[in-house]
Image (cartoon, rainbow, N blue to C red):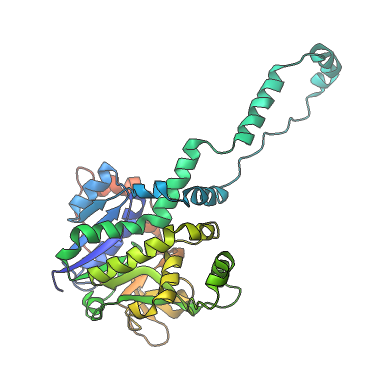
């Protein structure tokens, strides 16, 4: 594996347990067989998270993406997150009073009758005012940070490429929920043209599916500008990408411009995020994208789970051919189907960091394949 290859992934503290399994498999000589630089791109790690990065001999780049605070779509993004949160429970209705209080009801009514303001009226007025005022500034900030971390954090790759791109010949950019099963060289050796390499999801985009509805939303928002644009028969998945640094920067920067364009703000409320705008970019500039060979990477979301089977713990093959993909990306929460993965992915990240970044922390060696 050329030392001029870099592997990058996004993670804040909650993603570090997932990343740990990826790192073990990537560095295992019987799996990923990779010994080069690995970078964590983060909007902000805790001190314990930084200690973990150091213990695991990783490199770190942090960027809070402050320019997103000036984004015209910020308020829409906050409202999108807020709309997905449980509604506040309305004030509980008064329970029927015990019989003793029932007998006293008429007396109490006469006592309070005619008063302009009572304690209960004031309390009710405060409650009503709070409901009418809407979310607090702190709640909106929480929604903004949640949107930034979940739907925008990959944009940190641009800062990495600007600061460190010249140090490498190839860049692998992936999610944390990836398991390496074969040498990373199988991936890197395919990057021979100045294009962005990816693998699409298995299911086609059929009428009525969520992705079809997103494509329809684009045509609705953009009007005539969206007519005639073919957004593709299969979804691009940006959970595992490879390219030369200059190509990676060029296409991520183009995606950023689409994502943050004022004319596309209406798409944010319709659920569009980083991957959707890459689907749009691929439609506009298809010649700059290339597919990995089948069997290189499989995304288990959107039909991929039905294409593979677990032949032994933490080892997967295509069900029809028996071919073993080099990289398995457990996208869309499909890792929950497999107990060895779900136990780690679901664990409390504070407990994880206490174990691996505490005083007795040490880099864990990879499991045998």
Res 241 quadrant in image:
bottom left
The percent coordinates of residue 187 (x first, y second) are 26, 77
Res 173 quadrant in image:
bottom left
* Residue nearest the observer in this picture, 41 or 163: 163
* Residue nearest the observer in this picture, 355 or 332: 332
Res 121 quadrant in image:
top right
The residue that appears at 52% across and 61% down in the rendered structure is 267
Q: How many marks?
A: 0
- Left or right: 141 in relation to 252: right
The percent coordinates of residue 131 (x first, y second) are 63, 35
Depicted 256 relative to depicted 84: above or below: below
Depicted 116 relative to depicted 148: above or below: above
Residue 67 showing in the rendered view: yes
Where's the N terminus, which quadrant? Answer: bottom left
Q: Residue furthest bottom?
A: 321
* Residue nearest the observer in this picture, 352 or 119: 119
Depicted 154 relative to depicted 98: above or below: below
The residue that appears at 39% across and 76% down in the rendered structure is 285
Where's the C terminus, which quadrant? Answer: bottom left
Depicted 50 relative to depicted 157: above or below: above
The residue that appears at 23% across and 81% down in the rendered structure is 192
Q: Residue furthest front?
A: 224
- Left or right: 359 in relation to 43: left
Residue 337 showing in the rendered view: no
The percent coordinates of residue 338 (x first, y second) are 42, 66
């Amino acid at each position: 594996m050329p030392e001029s290859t870099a592997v990058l992934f996004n993670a804040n503290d909650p993603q570090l347990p997932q990343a740990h399994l990826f790192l073990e498999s990537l560095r295992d000589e019987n799996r990923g067989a990779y010994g080069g630089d690995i970078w964590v791109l983060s909007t902000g790690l805790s001190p314990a998270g930084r200690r973990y990065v150091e213990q695991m001999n990783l490199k770190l780049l942090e960027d809070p993406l402050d320019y997103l605070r000036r984004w015209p779509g910020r308020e829409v993004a906050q409202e999108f997150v807020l709309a997905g949160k449980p509604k506040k429970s309305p004030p509980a209705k008064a329970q029927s009073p015990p019989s003793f209080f029932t007998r006293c009801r008429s007396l109490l009514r006469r006592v309070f009758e005619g008063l302009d303001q009572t304690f209960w009226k004031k309390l009710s007025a405060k409650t009503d005012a709070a409901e009418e005022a809407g979310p607090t500034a702190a709640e909106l900030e929480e929604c903004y940070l949640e949107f930034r971390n979940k739907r925008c954090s990959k944009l940190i790759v641009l800062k990495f490429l600007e600061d460190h791109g010249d140090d490498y010949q190839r860049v692998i950019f992936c999610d944390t929920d990836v398991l390496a099963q074969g040498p990373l060289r199988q991936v890197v050796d395919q990057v021979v043209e100045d294009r962005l390499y990816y693998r699409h999801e298995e299911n086609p985009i059929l009428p009525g599916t969520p992705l079809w509805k997103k494509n329809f939303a684009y045509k609705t928002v953009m009007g005539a500008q969206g007519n005639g644009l073919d957004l593709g028969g299969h979804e691009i998945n940006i959970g595992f990408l490879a390219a030369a640094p200059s190509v990676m920067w060029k296409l991520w920067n183009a995606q950023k411009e689409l994502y943050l364009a004022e004319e596309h703000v209406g798409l944010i409320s319709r659920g569009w995020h980083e991957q959707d705008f890459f689907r749009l970019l691929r439609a506009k500039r298809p010649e700059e994208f290339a597919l990995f060979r089948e069997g290189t990477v499989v995304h288990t979301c959107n039909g991929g789970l039905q294409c593979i089977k677990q032949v032994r713990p933490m080892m997967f093959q295509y069900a029809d051919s028996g071919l073993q993909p080099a990289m398995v990306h457990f996208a869309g929460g499909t890792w929950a189907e497999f107990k060895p993965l779900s136990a780690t992915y679901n664990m409390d990240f504070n407990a994880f960091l206490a174990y691996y970044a505490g005083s007795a922390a040490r880099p864990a060696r990879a499991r045998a394949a």
